[in-house]
Amino acid sequence: MSRSKPDSLLALTQSFFASYLQSTRGVSSHTVRAYRDALKLFFLFTAGQKRKSIADLSLDDVDAETVLAFLQHLESKRSNSALTRNCRLAAIRSFVQHLLRHDVTRAGQYGRILAIRNKRAKYRAIEYLEPEEARAVIAAIDISSARGQRDRALLLLLYNTGARVSEALAVRRGDIRLDRPRHVRFLGKGRKERICPLWPETASALHRIIQTEGGTDALFQSHRGTPLTRDGVAYLLQKYVRRAAKNKPALCSRRVTPHVLRHSCAVALLQAGVDVSVIRDYLGHASVATTSRYITTNLQMKRQVLDAFWKRAGLAPAGSRKWKPSPNLLAFLQTL
């Protein structure tokens, strides 16, 4: 089998994922998969545009014109949103920056790609649960069984800490301290560690499942003894949301994912008056700009409350009519 040249597209693609993303940046497996899917789509499109096989693609084929055509293809043919288009472009940019570090002879070619700007995208309002809704979902869990105790501990941990579901599922028993000061250690994006305090209720729920299951493996396991998956957590959460909807009908129309619990934690902290920079560290955001999105959510909520208050207060004059000038008045003014 012939080995690829060190400066070939294949070799640099391999080093991008193995050396740069995983070893240098330490990104999560979720990010690796997202970048993999973006580049896979791009290479398939490029091969079609250049009318050659993927194996025959070279660094010369990675140019700005092809990237722009690919982005147009995503929106027109694949019906991707502007937000998805920007995410694909971010993956390509990161890859091209890697190419530039190892292939300065094509600096101009890569520079034109890096100059491609994001498209203005509309961000949907962040979905979150009010505290009473979150409590209703957690209260819907039957803790008479070991599985119920596991599920309650998991949902409490997600809501208490605002952890990403991947972070919560990666928690081991050694990451938790149940005596004062109660806390849990998470390994977040970029392999950054952070410590979050635990409510006594969360610590008590975690203590129960640690005593029940024992061992040093992943804390949250399926009935087969394997670690719970992201899809498994989403399924469990939806089950308890449906139960809670019997007493909270507003939940019937809501799509509550594990990430919604993360948003719910952030908004609750913001409503409690916690500074945005503290919330950033609490959630493990890389930039305060990401956390600032919750401020917009909170302001929107306040406007809705204010509008409802204005209508209920009855301060608007009933049956008010638009003023129209009297012909007599105009005649009077004409005489002046």
Image (cartoon, rainbow, N blue to C red):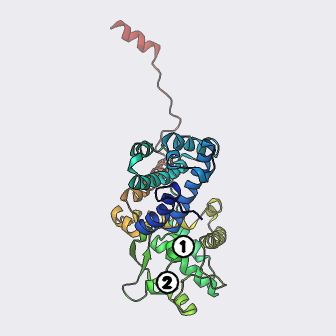
Q: Secondary structure at mark 2?
A: loop
Amino acid, disc 2: Arg
Residue 295: give x, y in percent of width and height: 41, 56
- The residue carrying mark 2 is 172
Camera-side residue: 258 or 250? 258
Image quadrant where one finds the N terminus: bottom right
Residue at x 60% of width, y 82% of height: 221
Question: Which part of the image, by quadrant, shows the C terminus?
Answer: top left
Query: Few, some or many C-alpha atoms within 10 Å of disc 2 (few <14, some 14-19, many ≥20)?
Result: some
Reply above or below: 237 against 314.
below
Q: Residue pushed farthest top? A: 335
Image position of 314 with respect to 257: above or below: above
Q: Which element type, helix, strand or loop, lies under badge 1?
A: helix
Numbered label attached to residue 135: 1
Which residue is rendered at x = 62% and y = 76% of the image?
140
- The amino acid at mark 1 is Arg
On screen, residue 282 versus residue 125, left or right, reads left
Look at 46% across and 45% down and name the residue there. Answer: 118
From the top left corner, tell me how far across and down residue 19 is, in percent: 45, 66
Whether residue 283 is visible to the viewer of this picture, yes or no, is: no
